[in-house]
Image: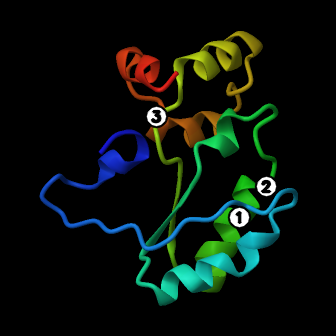
Amino acid sequence: REGAFDIYAKEDQVEIVGYANCGGCPGGNIEYVPEEMKKNGAEVIHLATGLVVGYPPCPYIKHFQDLIRVKYNLKVVVGTHPIPQKYFAIHSTLGTWESRELSDYIKPTLSSEKLRLLYD
């Protein structure tokens, strides 16, 4: 359990009940996919790390979080797997994640450099 999945204790039983992409801008799948996941037992929705490592980072993350929380009453975590080092390096150079909002989004997937390198 690495990246944003490390919030779950190793002794906890965790089950992935579904996954989907956002459907492209502005995220059409976000409107209905969480409903299906909730029907399948989802208690938490993880938004993919790719939303913050893409360039530019997805401008709709906050909207997605708000919609899922309000409409489906599900917890939302930004991130899945650790950020690969190559993405960390370029975004650090560009200053992409300097805003408070984006720096908060990357925290769950930041991990150690050693782990980030494994995801390159």
Q: Nearer the viewer, residue 94 or 5?
A: 5
Residue at 87% across, 57% down: 25
Residue 105's place in the image compared with 70, above or below, is: above
Residue at 87% across, 60% down: 26
Label 3 vs 2, first from the N-terminus: 2
Residue at 47% across, 37% down: 109
Residue farthest to the bottom?
39
Q: Mark number for residue 60? A: 2
On the rendered image, what quadrant is the N terminus found in?
top left
Amino acid tagged 1: Phe
Disc 1 designates what residue? 64
Residue 78's place in the image compared with 106, above or below, is: below
Disc 3 designates what residue? 82
- Pointers 1 and 2 in contact (CB under 8 A)? yes
> How many neighbours does mark 2 have within 10 angstroms: few (below 14), some (14-19), or many (20 or more)?
few
State the separation of the CA atoms marked 1 and 3: 20 Å
Amino acid tagged 2: Tyr
